[in-house]
Image: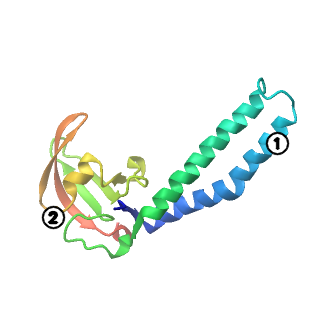
């Protein structure tokens, strides 16, 4: 059975655009670079050729990875999620009970998570601990800094954040 990857519409489109760029631009550029490098003679000691071949390998690997992720993507409309409980796509406001600092994160897929921009993966320790919880619930999370406790203050849709 194929394991589905939850993904927002925006995350799906970003991966799709990257795949298109790799297939239509980067792949063609690296093929041309290989052709030029071949024209420079002995391939055994041609650093330009080896660098281009290595780049080609990275591009082809990323193309395969993106096709796999896009093929398994389960695109979720984050603007229509239920806000009774924490689910994929919701924006959750938390109070760190140790520091009394308030933080706000949107729960997204592993390929979309970016703590600096306010999103975390549903597969992260904090993401897993929040799933299914309601406003007022307290959660304990084991992090690299030790066990941390949070209280869920608010659950909202991303367009309401």
* Residue drawn at x 26%, y 60% as measured from the top left: 92
Question: For the residue labelled by badge 1, is the local secondary structure a helix, a strand or a loop?
Answer: helix
The spot of residue 27 in percent (x, y) is 70, 51
Residue at left 72%, top 38%? Answer: 52
Per the model, the C-alpha gap separating discs 1 and 2 is 59 Å
Could you tell me which residue is drawn at 48 percent across and 57 percent down?
68
Structural crowding at the residue carrying mark 1, measured as other residues with C-alpha within 10 Å and reported as few (<14), some (14–19) or many (≥20): few
> Secondary structure beneath disc 2?
loop
Task: Give the image location of residue 28, x and y in percent.
Answer: 74, 52
Q: Residue at x 75, y 27 (%)?
A: 47
Residue 84: give x, y in percent of width and height: 19, 71
Q: Which of the two marks, 1 or 2, is nearer to us in this view? A: 1
Residue furthest to the left in view is 137
Residue 106 higher or lower than 114, as above or below = below
Point out which mark residue 99 bears.
none
- Packing grade of label 2 (10 A; few <14, some 14-19, many >=20) is some
The residue that disc 1 covers is 35
Give the vertical position of 148 relative to 114 (above or below).
above
- Towards the viewer: 42 or 154: 42
Q: Which residue is mark 2?
A: 134
Picture quadrant of residue 58: top right
Which quadrant: the C terminus? Answer: bottom left
Q: Indicate left or right for 58 with 145 as reference.
A: right
Residues at marks 1 and 2 touching, judged by CB atoms closer than 8 Å:
no
Q: Earlier in the sequence, mark 1 or mark 2?
A: 1
Q: Quadrant of the N terminus?
A: bottom left
| Image location (x, y in percent) of residue 76 | 38, 70
Q: From this viewpoint, which residue is outermost toward the bottom?
A: 80
């Amino acid at each position: 059975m194929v394991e589905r990857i939850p993904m927002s519409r925006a995350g799906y489109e970003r991966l799709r655009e990257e795949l298109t760029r790799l297939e239509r631009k980067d792949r063609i550029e690296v093929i041309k670079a290989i052709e030029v490098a071949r024209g420079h003679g002995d391939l055994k000691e041609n650093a330009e050729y080896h660098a281009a071949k290595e780049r080609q390998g990275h591009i082809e690997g990323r193309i395969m990875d993106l096709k796999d992720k896009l093929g398994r993507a389960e695109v979720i409309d984050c603007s229509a999620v239920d806000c009774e409980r924490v689910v994929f796509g919701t924006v959750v406001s938390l109070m760190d009970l140790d520091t009394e600092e308030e933080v706000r994160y949107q729960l997204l897929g592993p390929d979309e998570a970016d703590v600096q921009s306010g999103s975390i993966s549903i597969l992260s320790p904090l993401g897993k601990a929040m799933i299914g919880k309601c406003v007022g619930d307290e959660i304990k999370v084991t992090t690299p800094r030790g066990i941390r406790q949070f209280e869920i203050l608010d659950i909202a849709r991303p367009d309401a954040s």
